[in-house]
Amino acid sequence: MAVLFTGDPGVRKDESGYFLQASDIDSADQDGREPVLVAETILSRLIGTAKTLVSTFAEVTISGWEGYQPKARLAITGIWGMTWDPINHGLDVEWAQSALALADSDSSLRVARVLRLMSSLARDASWFDMYKIFELVREDVGRKAVIELFGGDRALSDFTESATRYEISGDRARHAVYPGSPSGRSMAVGDARIKIRDVVRKWLAGRATAY
């Protein structure tokens, strides 16, 4: 993360380890915000961005405050999974900074919400969260464009049906009972996570170009 997020907010390394550093954390106590909550919000955006870029990105957590001052830096642990390789993954620092800038400037908050939901996919490929991401992107670009982002109507249909139906995804599905009969097609949850990651990357790239 220290390689990927070099700006503000960003991740720094010193003799004690890695730290989340952001001016927004430092100023939080001055305007009545809780620094820990601000830090958690910022970290979720960083994780969501990293997860969109690097499929093997591992869990990152805030391990605690350094010192007692509210504006102290936050230590973070579990930076990368052992399989991460910045060269082979083609780490795009400029893309990451662009995604964070979009999250800050987007008045609809869709970008920030998508990145926060993407951060949870580092822990669990939840149909609930992936479907929310799909809904946010669809609301932003419209149904026709979201079909294109998914690579066609069939891929989108397989995704939504697998997310929705108990007959396909069991108790992990969004509904216990759903009208009608399954089509017979499906999308595995792991494949859905890959698809959603691809959709978000394309969507953010389009957003950056448009704005």
Image: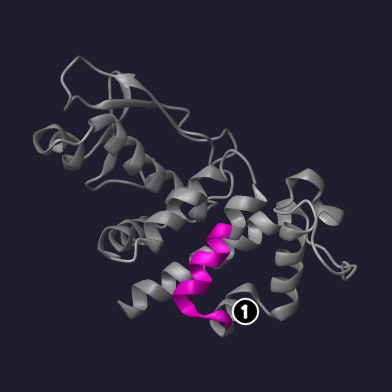
**Residue 43 figure quarter:** top left
Residue 162 drawn above or below residue 172? below
> Which of the colour schemes (rainbow, by chain, secondary structure, one colour) is used?
one colour
The reply, left or right, for residue 199 in relation to residue 207 is: right
The magenta stretch spans residue 136: yes
Helix, strand or loop for disc 1? helix
Q: Please tell me whether the stretch drawn in magenta is mainly helix, strand or loop.
A: helix
Do we see residue 39 in this rendering? yes
Percent x, y of residue 211: 30, 76
**Residue 147 figure quarter:** bottom right
Percent x, y of residue 56: 58, 44
Toward the bottom, the furthest residue is 144
* Residue beneath disc 1: 147
Q: Number of callouts in the render?
A: 1
What is the span of residues highlighted in magenta in the rendered image? Answer: 132-143
Residue 173 drawn above or below residue 133? above
Q: Which residue is drawn at 53% across and 52% down?
A: 89
User: Which amino acid type is marked by label 1?
Assistant: Ile
